[in-house]
Image: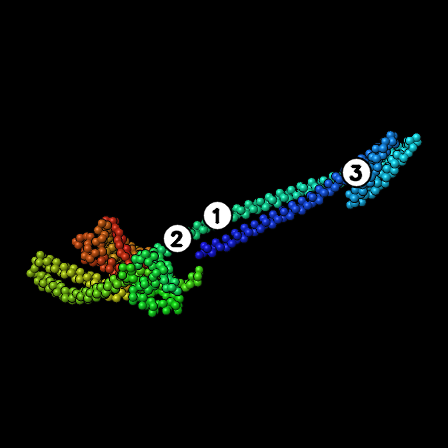
Amino acid sequence: MQRSNKAEPKSRSALVTTGAFFILAMLLSIGVTVVAYRSVRLFEARAIWVEHTHTVLQRLEETHSTLRDLVANARGYALSSRHEYLLGFESDRNLLHQLLGGLRALQIDNQDQLDRLTHLSITIAQRIELARTLIEADKEVRIDNAYEHGRDLSEDIRRQFVALKEVEQALLTERSADTRESIRWTILAILGGSFVSIAILIAVYLRLKRETLRRREAQIKAQLYAAEIEDLYNQAPCGYHSIDEKSGLIVQINDTELAWLGYAREQVVGKMTQTDLMTPASADRYRQEWRPRLLHDKAVGGVDVDCLRADGTHFSTLMSISTVLNPDDGRVMSRNVIYDVSDRKQTEKEIEELNASLKRQTQHLSNINKELESFSYSVSHDLRAPLRAISGYALMVEEDYADALDAKGQELLQVIRRNVSKMDALINDLLKLSKSATGELTLGNFSMQEQVEQSIVGLRRENGNVEFIVDPLEDVVANQGLLSQVWENLLGNAVKFSKKAEHAVVRVSSTSTPEEVIYQVQDNGIGFDMRYVHKLFGTFQRLHRQEDYAGTGIGLALVQRIVVRHGGRVWAESRSGEGASFYFTLPRQAL
């Protein structure tokens, strides 16, 4: 939905921009049309004035030519008295009146030219009158003066015609230049506007094409997204179905739920109701409990429903229902989500059985522990009493009958006493091992540095040749009594296997991580073969002969049991003849 929301403003903006470009192109086209129309109208008006000027020039030329014809006809008649010359004269005189009237009409907008034309008309009238006089004169009378005066008038008329033509020619030149300029600007306006319009239309076309491609890509993406959503809907790990609450029929269901139920889609959609998918007991609960809640709260979540398969078997599900309005027709739809919890139910049943079994095992272990405690009590009292008796009688025999015993007898009595002492030490270690795993684990804060120093005091006094190095040690929360046993055993082991070295050194140090503190006891003794490291922490396991190094074989097993009970780990590293390092860890957060 988020992608759709982001795409809508972008699409709307693209449409607005494209519309703006299109409107701009239309306005520009209209503007170009208006400019072209006005330019054409202006060109038309100027062309009319140019044509007007041409007409004036033509009329001037025609008027001048007619005047010359009139004078020629008058002279011809005066010389030959031929009647056709007289007719020509009259015709030209009438035509001149018409031409001059037409010229005055053409020059009505130009007062200067009109004044010149008026003066010309007066002069032409004088010239016509002179020509008429020539026609009416007596042939015997000399008309030289008339000829001479006629030439002067004709020259004056010619100059006036030239002046009129020059003015009109100047107007023609000016108007032609204006017309050409108008044509040039009209062409530029049309071409420029057309070019800009075409450019905008091309831009609009390209934008529309890009928008079309974008929409096509968006449509393809939407189709792929819809297909992906449909695939996710159908392949979801939970079941989905929708119900038209008005008809009560299922209108949509995904493949996962169909596979669980064992139905085909056409068997369910539009044909089955909610309760058709449930066992009778669950259907009754739906009608009596869940549907009223759904109508009131618009949602029901996390109800246990037994669904009925097509083959009549059923399976346990967890169902949640919510109601929505169909955006197309406004109908109320209920959406149902179901989870197959058959495996969970089976697991819960197995867990309950395991818990019951664990409870029985715990009770059995408790009984065994009680028996072990009873055994420990018997060992500490019943076994020690005979041992003390044996040791005491052996001592009495050795003291009272020393004279009667030879050296061999006394040696045998000492062997008896040594083995009794060894047996007593073994019983003590067994009792310690038993107590390390039983009883309440009381934790507290204490100084690990002081505890190690206290454990070293006795060892340093009995083993003066051993050098002890204790680095600063980090403290943790633990049982001080049990940890003192750990340090005594590890330090005692280190002294025992290194005291034969030329310069025996035992070093204690610690490092830490965010989760735990690691303690290390390192010596430079005889070490051990790492191939047998798995035997190191076993009960009664020994890697050296009893004759070489005394011990019961329980010390390291006791260390491991105490450390593991605190939630830590124990391990060792060594090479034969190169000393050994023993490590154990304790968690920063007490268990």
Q: Nearer the viewer, residue 12 or 549?
A: 12
Q: 108 or 526, which lies in front? A: 108
Q: Amino acid at mark 3?
A: Leu
Q: CA distance from mark 2 to mark 3?
A: 93 Å
Compared with 579, 58 (above or below) is above
In the image, taking residue 453 as reference, residue 216 lies left or right, namely right
Q: Position of residue 237 (x, y in %)?
A: 34, 57
Amino acid type at image mark 1: Leu
Element assignment for label 2: helix
Determine crowd level at label 1: few under 14, some 14-19, many 20+ residues with C-alpha closer than 10 A: few
Q: Residues within 10 Å of mark 2 (few under 14, many from 20)?
A: few
Q: Position of residue 509 (x, y in %)?
A: 31, 56
Classify residue 31 as left or right of residue 265. right
Q: In the rendered view of the protein, which quadrant contains the N terminus? A: bottom left
Cβ atoms at labels 3 and 1 below 8 Å apart: no
CA distance for labels 3 and 1:
71 Å
Q: Residue at x 90, y 35 (%)?
A: 136
Q: Nearer the viewer, residue 258 or 586?
A: 258
- Per the image, label 1 sits on a secondary structure element best described as helix
The residue drawn where x is 54% and y is 47% is 204
Pick the quarter of the image with the C terminus: bottom left
Q: In terms of sequence position, does the residue under pointer 3 or pointer 1 come before the other? A: 3
Say which residue label 1 marks.
213
The residue under label 3 is 60
The residue that mark 2 highlights is: 228
